[in-house]
Amino acid sequence: MRRLLLLLLLAASPAAGQDLAGHGGPVRALAMHGALLASGGFDQAVILWDPAAGRARRVLRWHRGAVNAVLTLPDGRLATAGEDARIALWGAGGNEPERVLEGHSEPVAALAAEGTRLASAAWDGTVRLWDLGTGEARVLEGHAGNVNAVAFAGGALHSTGQDGTLRRWEANGSARTLAEFGLPRTALLALPDGSLAVAGVDGTVTLVSAEGTQRDLRTGPRPVIALAAAPDGRTLAVGTIGGAVELLDLPLGRVRGTLEGPGLPVWSLAFAPDGATLWSGGQDRRVRRWDAATSRPLGPLTQEAEEAAPAGLDRLGAEVWRACQACHMLRPDAAPMAGPHLHGLFGRRMGSVLGYAYSERLARGDIVWTAETVADLFTRGPDVVTPGTRMPVQRVSDPEEMQALIRFLQAATR
């Protein structure tokens, strides 16, 4: 299953979309974090967005690999985990985690929390139950193959994965198999009524009660890889490899709307606290927002933050620039963003904008930005040119687009 997921990630090419272009790779995870929206990407970055202002507030670039899970903990902190097998706990500020939980030997696929307990599912075949106070973990073994999802329901921890089983973990660490599906399960979600929604590679979404009673809500030809429930528990959002998102009425499971995306995998879903807005993230590197009542797109998350480009500049370059605009502004007097402003970029030494908290790598200042060094940054990628930076991985592979971007920046940053 692990190889299948990686192949699916790499096989699809990015497509033009309506929304956010802040990530340099597929958006693997979404979660509301207070008034902010947290997104984790295949580009190793976590971005905290302010939906009301339409702009990025923080970029957390610490993980060494894809970020597969983001979760707001009961105490208000943010937890992130991913391909590097580490779990990071983040406070309200700073660019380094407050605590790092280590122990898994393979990528962490999912997180769940209840009270002072944090559960992690990993491709090393284990579930770990962490004490958030001490940082110690109990290792729960029993699955055969990758564990893809975890959820707390009815005071108990549940998990599912490649072996197609849904397991309930007892307080003594033993497991009871609630359901056997025969094929790998990819997503697991606790619903407000105490039941669980389980989805798999066969396109089926099943409701499972605390007693193990099963009822299929949905069957389809394409694997389901993302689930989210509205806060009132009356709507279930289902994302697939095919790119569409279905909205199901609960508890009956009737399809009442379909969100038509770009035809690429939807890896992550999250409802806003009021249940009226649904966020989706996927293979096209965008975070999109939808009206959950009408199933219609609500337009770009970055719309309000977009800075009008000076008139008469390279049009293609301005289009390429939109991928940078999620984190940077052109003017020195612009409102704070996740990245520094780019005014006076060419001829400027890396890490030299006063008042901006650079990562240790960029603060070295050993690169002067020229047309050649900017082109090198976006040809090889920030992760190669400036390893250790928190900048999301963005690459421009088309030579014509690269030259257009350079022309645009040379004029717009003067």
Image (cartoon, rainbow, N blue to C red):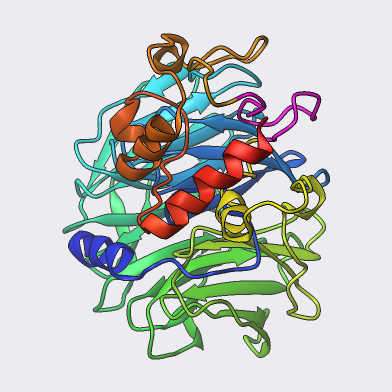
Residue 397, located in which quarter of the rendered image?
Answer: bottom left
Q: In terms of secondary structure, what is the magenta stretch mainly?
A: loop
Which part of the image, by quadrant, shows the N terminus? bottom left
Q: Is residue 6 above or below residue 347?
A: below
Apparent side of residue 359 relative to residue 30 in the rendered image (left or right): left
Q: Position of residue 95 (x, y in %)?
A: 53, 19
For the residue pair 223 and 17, the one nearer the viewer reads as 17
Q: Residue at x 33, y 34 (%)?
A: 383
Q: Residue at x 28, y 36 (%)?
A: 84
Q: Is residue 302 above or below residue 88?
A: below
Q: Residue at x 34, y 37 (%)?
A: 376
Apparent side of residue 259 relative to residue 284 in the rendered image (left or right): right
Total marks placed: 0
Q: Position of residue 198 (x, y in %)?
A: 45, 70
Q: Position of residue 399 (x, y in %)?
A: 37, 56
Magenta segment: 329-344
Q: Is residue 171 visible?
A: no
Q: Is residue 246 visible?
A: yes
Q: Residue at x 39, y 42 (%)?
A: 378
Which part of the image, by quadrant, shows the C terminus? top right
Say whether residue 339 is magenta.
Answer: yes
Say whether residue 256 is magenta.
Answer: no
